[in-house]
Amino acid sequence: MVFYFKARPEAGDYTIFMGLDKFENEELIKYGFPEDIWFHVDKMSSAHVYIRLHKGQSIDDISEGVLEDCVQLVKANSIQGNKVNNIDVVYTPWSNLKKTASMDVGQVGFHNPKMVRTVRVEKRINEIVNRLNRTKVERKPDLKAEREAVNAAERAERKLQLRDKKRREEMERLEKERQSELRSYKGLMVSENMTSNKQIATTSKSLQELEEDFM
């Protein structure tokens, strides 16, 4: 089971989601998207919360309002973190999550700790948590199928782009050949014209000499 929430409307169309338990968390870790940003209460047990950014966006594009929605949802879904003030929430791109065979189910590390950011959450804000919970939808998605469908679409797009690139390159090559042939033809015409003028001048001179000789 995966729970889906809608971030504040004024921030744009963003979906925040989290797994029911560590087994769903494991699936979310395995089949995440490049646009996913992962959130967790630092040094405490909590839900693994994600937000899916728009294509082309990065962690730097998360607005303060959307960030507040995410960290409040993480805090509210931490048994220990929900009871205390001034907790830290860490967040990082999904691609930075590291999973090894020795880790427990739902446990993760980081490829690059420098890519992990921390935000201090002073207290729970019920207004935000309640608003998010009103948008809550439960689903049982096939995360593997969703990921494979996206991979297939991306492969098809790359093939199309490659085909277009080759077509443009071929058109450019043909145009260069055409321009080269035109330059060669013009050069040939100039050379023929110069030769013809010279021949005419020579012929005229010879006729004049003949006339003088005749006189």
Image (cartoon, helix red, strand yellow):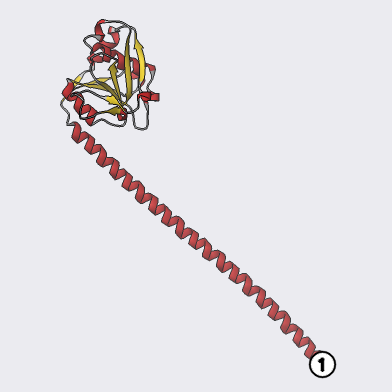
10 Å crowding of disc 1: few (<14), some (14-19), many (20+): few
Judge from the rendering whether residue 159 lies leftward or rightward of residue 203; answer left or right: left
Asked if residue 142 is positioned above or below residue 16 in the image, the reply reads: below
| Quadrant position of residue 105 | top left
Residue 21 percent across, percent down from the top left: 17, 20
The foreground one among 31 and 3 is: 31
The foreground one among 30 and 158 is: 30
Quarter occupied by the N terminus: top left
| Quadrant position of residue 113 | top left
Residue 165 percent across, percent down from the top left: 39, 50
Asked if residue 131 is positioned above or below residue 13 in the image, the reply reads: above
Residue 136 percent across, percent down from the top left: 21, 18
Residue 138 percent across, percent down from the top left: 17, 21
Q: Is residue 157 visible?
A: yes
Residue named by callout 1: 213
Residue sitting at 54 percent across and 65 percent down?
182
Residue sitting at 40 percent across and 24 percent down?
60
Q: Residue furthest right?
A: 215
At label 1, which amino acid type do we have? Asp
Q: What SS does tag 1 mark?
A: helix
